[in-house]
Image (spheres, rainbow, N blue to C red):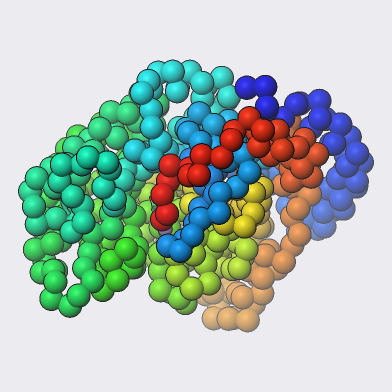
Amino acid sequence: MTQRIDKSLIAEENAKLESYLKEDYQALGNQLARKNINIDDITAKAEEFQIAVPSWGTGTGGTRFARFPGEGEPRNIWEKIEDSAVINDLSHCTERVSPHFPWDKVDDFSELKQTSDSLNLKWDSINSNTFQDQPGQEHSYKYGSLANTSAAARDLAIQHNLDCIEWGKELGSKTLTVWVGDGSNHPGQQHFQSAFERYLESMKSIYAGLPSDWELHIEHKMFEPAFYSTIIQDWGSNILAAMELGPQAKSLVDLGHHAPNVNIEMIVSRLIQFKKLGGFHFNDSKYGDDDLDSGSLHPYQQFLIFNELVDAEYRGQEGFKPNYMLDQSHNVTDPIESLMNSAASVQRSYIAALLVNRPQLTEYQTNNDALMCSNTLKNAFNTDISPILAMARFRKGGAIDPIATYRKANYRGIVGKLRPSSGGNGSGIV
Ligand code: PSV
Ligand code: MN
Ligand code: MN
């Protein structure tokens, strides 16, 4: 693991910024104190915050049209976790990695676990993949996987998910995330009800194989790869499936998987209310499932989602423990830089939402003072909490300025020499 970023370089870079950070932190502390908020309490929350990195996000993504491989991108899961360790060493809020099977090829799970332990990384949700065929696959997923009209194809997809659970147990994961591409491209191609029944039957077999301390997360997506109908197209079908399966099944919200202008924060509230919010795939989008960097376009929407999450935390909503993860595709940036930026962007939304004066908001809501309700949220959102994020990283041994430190270390240049281009990151074009 020689190419990891040297702790002494982090310390050196931090030393250049430390006094400025302390000044800014003090100034923000004074500002928050006037609102009876203790900045150190908020910073402690920032230090606790964790968001998982997707293994596939460490490589360059692509579109249906092309993929331009990046310099020194990871060629296998071992190199992906090496990059993930760099992200966490600098950011200190991404200690978990979410694998995707069989994109991540692993022969020896105990060896992988040992290596991830040595990198101070843990494993997040296991993502199964039945939306593409693997070389030599006996029964094709061309017409679907868990909802396929062919029982043999369905059984194959079920077995893959059960295998994922076994692999996850070896890695210490506790969640299986299922996203399928099943759907249709032509009106009439698929009998909606029969297809959903087949999906539910398959999911019941997977649910039956779930250890009692695991959760099964169902991810909905409006369209793509199927362009007319998708089996779990929205949170409605998602929560129906989760309710049908049982308490360990929950819905996962990927921000890019909704129609434009959909009120995602309200969906989040509904899922919280009915104890069905499993977690998130954070990203941002302009048009569809763009997988752009989290908070790069709609930071206020991301804040409003966290406003709901913090509200549930504040109310002590029973069983509330959603899982946070990034799911982005990087085409024109260094994936490590994008993931560090995005983790901080999501963390920023969480911290800003903690600043909302909730008793005050309730009072304004009760009195129907719409303007002041909105201003209460805007007040929190508009507070520049950057010094809190930087201080949280600094106190945990990370970088005050992760991007600058990463660039200074020339990590990309170093791994560029060690990892000759493989022409692919194992994730295909999704
Ligand atoms: C599908 O678009 C998705 O959001 C699912 O989470 C997949 O597992 C992931 O993207 C892979 O790119
Ligand atoms: Mn996703
Ligand atoms: Mn997606």
Query: Based on the displayed image, in which of its 4 quarters is residue 232 positioned?
Result: bottom left
Q: Quadrant of residue 129?
A: top left
- In this view, 137 is above or below 5: below
- Total numbered circles: 0
Q: Position of residue 201 (x, y in %)?
A: 11, 50
On the image, the x and y values in percent for residue 398 come to 72, 35
Q: Nearer the viewer, residue 184 or 19?
A: 184
What percent of the width, then of the height, locates residue 377? 63, 68
In the image, 32: left or right of 261?
Answer: right
State which quarter of the image contains the C terminus. bottom left
Which corner quadrant of the figure contains ligand 3? bottom left
Image point (23%, 71%), residue name: 185
| 31 left or right, relative to 227 | right
Q: Is residue 371 left or right of residue 26?
A: left
Asked whether residue 239 appears in the rendered view, the answer is no
Q: Nearer the viewer, residue 221 or 135?
A: 135
Report whether residue 295 is seen: yes
Residue beneath the point at 62% across and 22% down: 1
301 vs 260: above or below: above
Q: Position of residue 299 (x, y in %)?
A: 61, 65
Query: Which residue lies at the image location 9% right of the left edge and 57% below the top edge?
Result: 149
Left or right of 178, for residue 92: right
The part of the image, by quadrant, that contains residue 289 is bottom left
Up-down relation of residue 66 to residue 423 (above or below): below
252 or 380: nearer the eye? 252
Q: Nearer the viewer, residue 299 or 375?
A: 299
